[in-house]
């Protein structure tokens, strides 16, 4: 045990270890990156986190910077949950769901709490957090907040930043602050503090005032782009009120370590209806999805026909597939599958939307499977396993790199993008089928690639660079469902507005003066630095999605 870990063990209630097996266990997340920490800390209380950060801050002041990485379940796909230095893991002890205010629908929770457990607890009160990611079964609420996670309902309900009301945050120097929306008078009071907190409020307010036009453009943009700290545009409202909360949501632990949070829940309807559609013709598939948006479903999930073909090859026989087959047992053509979810509390409204959706399905020759009871909805929702059944059923086809998830594409450019993507697929010889959410335009692509040699890694990164170039050329973003972490940074930094990048760098410098908060994440880094930490033996199955809920 090092002197540092021994010192921390003496002063913390939680555990501190330098055990090689423990360090190896937390050296990876759901990304292709591997970085073993020097020390692993399991804090029991906020004061433990405060002591760790104060210690590293004081060391950094003397010229010895040690990075601190906050980690939940490690389901991050961008390498933001791993790092050298100290890994602070909240799942062991800081995982409580404290209380629920049923009148205001506010829940107080610690960052290490499992997201699905929180949803179950809220479900007993007839509520939920609508912005849950696909990894809800195994990820933490802290990780979701750190990434500003989104999911199948985010197109209509928003990402998780819409539901975070207040945060308790440990700053880089160990100070603890509580964030909430402040009036102009309260803001002036905060700015008058001769503390690190006061300095933050003063500097961030000045940054916002000095870059109003740039931030307004960012706020009004249609694109979903989580690069940097785009929520800076939401910190100060036109009425002068001020709230740092949005800034920490999606910051991936680079501005402070969240130790507690208050979230706003929404009422949930258990009587949802689900319409599953199998579309035989690829052109009809695209057109049908466009028209289904007008019906205003709560979720509109799409699956490329090539994913369907993979799943079928691996033996899957969903009811919808069977309905599409011929009476003689011949395999029916499926160019794409669509899942329409309707959660309106008003039964008449649900039925009206279902009727409209069925008519559109008939118009485009789609095969229809309708589910309106909880049991049938659960069975039909199994179709959400198409991508995983096709990509992870055996080990012959190669690895699906995590790089290709969380991609935003505007609906107006989607068809044009698909044509350009087909050209890239032809050039590279790599198929890039997709699934995703047409309600907000966030998609995941599922290439299957070998990853055995250094040459294989280089080919993946070369393909991804060409893919990213294509996405941005069609007004999209490769960083939409989470932050860029360290894995995507080399690919997005050259495609981010220079002035905006400078503002984001200034924001980080305010909170992280000595570079002790998740070093290398959300920062400009060279591609070779990423390559150096690509892990051997990556198979893409750490969090393959089999625990995703229906």
Image (cartoon, grey):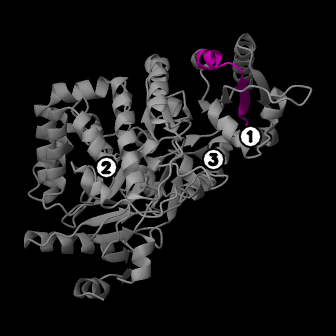
For the residues marked 2 and 3, what is the alpha-carbon distance in whole angstroms? 29 Å
Camera-nearest residue between 338 and 132: 338
Q: Secondary structure at mark 3?
A: helix
**Disc 2 to disc 1, C-alpha distance:** 40 Å
- Viewer-proximal residue among 191 and 54: 54
Q: Quadrant of the C terminus?
A: top right
Q: Residue at x 48, y 41 (%)?
A: 150
At x 31% / y 23%, what residue is drawn? 220
453 relative to 348 in the view: left or right: left
Residue lying farthest to the right in this orientation = 328
Q: Around disc 3, counting alpha carbons within 10 Å, would you say few (fewer than 14), some (14 to 19), or many (20 or more)? A: some
Disc 2 element: loop
Is label 1 in a helix, a strand or a loop? helix
Is-magenta flag for residue 282? yes
Q: Which x, y percent locates residue 115?
A: 54, 55
Q: Is residue 51 above or below residue 515?
A: below
Q: Nearer the viewer, mark 3 or mark 1?
A: 1
Task: Identify the image quadrant of the N terminus.
Answer: bottom left
Instruction: Write down the region rendered in magenta.
Output: 271-288
Q: Which residue is mark 1?
A: 312
Would you name the residue on which mark 3 appears?
Answer: 388
Q: Report whether residue 441 is seen.
A: no
Residue 198 highlighted magenta (yes or no): no
Q: Is residue 191 left or right of residue 343?
A: left
Which residue is pictured at 60% across the width and 29% down the height?
Answer: 298
Q: Residues within 10 Å of mark 2 (few under 14, many from 20)?
A: many
Residue at mark 2: 251
Q: Position of residue 369 (x, y in %)?
A: 79, 28
Sequence-first disc among 3 and 1: 1
């Amino acid at each position: 045990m090092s002197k540092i870990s021994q010192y921390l063990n003496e002063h913390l209630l939680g555990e501190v270890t330098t055990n090689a097996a423990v360090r190896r266990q937390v050296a990876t997340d759901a990304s292709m990156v591997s970085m073993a920490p020097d020390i692993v800390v399991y804090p029991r209380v906020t004061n433990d986190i405060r002591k760790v950060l104060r210690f590293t801050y004081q060391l950094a002041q003397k010229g010895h910077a040690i990075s601190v990485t906050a980690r939940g379940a490690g389901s991050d796909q961008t390498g933001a949950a791993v790092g050298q230095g100290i890994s602070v893991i909240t799942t062991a002890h800081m995982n409580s769901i404290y209380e629920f205010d049923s009148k205001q629908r506010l829940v107080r929770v610690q960052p290490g709490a499992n997201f699905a457990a929180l949803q179950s607890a809220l479900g007993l009160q007839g509520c939920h957090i609508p912005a849950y990611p696909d990894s809800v079964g195994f990820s933490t609420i802290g990780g979701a907040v750190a990434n500003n996670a989104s999911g199948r309902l985010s197109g209509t309900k928003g990402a998780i930043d819409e539901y975070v009301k207040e945060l308790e945050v440990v700053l880089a120097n160990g100070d603890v602050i509580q964030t909430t929306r402040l009036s102009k008078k309260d803001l002036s009071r905060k700015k008058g503090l001769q503390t690190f907190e006061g300095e933050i409020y003063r500097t961030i307010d000045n940054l916002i005032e000095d870059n109003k036009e740039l931030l307004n453009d960012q706020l009004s943009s249609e694109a979903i782009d989580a690069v940097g700290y785009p929520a800076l545009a939401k910190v100060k409202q036109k009425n002068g009120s001020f709230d740092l909360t949005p800034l920490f949501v999606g910051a991936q632990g680079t501005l402070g370590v969240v130790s507690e949070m208050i979230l706003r829940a929404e009422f949930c309807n258990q009587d949802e209806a689900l319409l599953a559609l199998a579309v035989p013709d690829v052109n009809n598939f695209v057109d049908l999805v466009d028209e289904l948006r007008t019906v205003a479903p709560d979720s509109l999930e799409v699956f490329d026909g090539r994913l369907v073909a993979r799943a079928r090859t691996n033996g899957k026989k969903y009811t919808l597939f069977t309905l599409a087959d011929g009476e003689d047992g011949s395999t029916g053509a499926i160019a794409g599958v669509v899942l329409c979810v309707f959660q309106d509390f008003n039964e008449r409204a649900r039925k009206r939307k279902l009727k409209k959706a069925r008519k559109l399905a008939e118009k485009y020759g789609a095969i229809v499977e309708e589910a309106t009871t909880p049991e049938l909805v659960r069975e039909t929702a199994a179709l959400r396993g198409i991508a995983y059944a096709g990509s992870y059923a055996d080990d012959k086809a190669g690895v699906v790199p995590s790089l290709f998830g969380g991609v935003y594409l505007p609906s107006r450019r989607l068809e044009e993008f698909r044509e350009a993507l087909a050209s890239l697929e032809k050039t590279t010889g790599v198929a890039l089928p997709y699934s995703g959410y047409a309600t907000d335009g966030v998609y995941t692509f599922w290439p299957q690639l070998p990853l055995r040699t250094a040459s294989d890694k280089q080919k993946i990164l070369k393909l991804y660079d060409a893919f990213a170039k294509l996405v941005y050329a069609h007004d999209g973003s490769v960083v939409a469902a989470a932050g860029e972490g360290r894995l995507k940074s080399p690919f997005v930094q050259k495609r981010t507005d220079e002035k905006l990048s400078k503002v984001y760098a200034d924001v980080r410098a305010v909170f992280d003066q000595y570079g002790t908060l998740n070093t290398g994440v959300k920062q400009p880094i060279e591609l070779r630095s990423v390559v150096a930490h690509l892990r051997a033996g990556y198979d893409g199955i750490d969090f393959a999605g089999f625990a995703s809920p229906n």
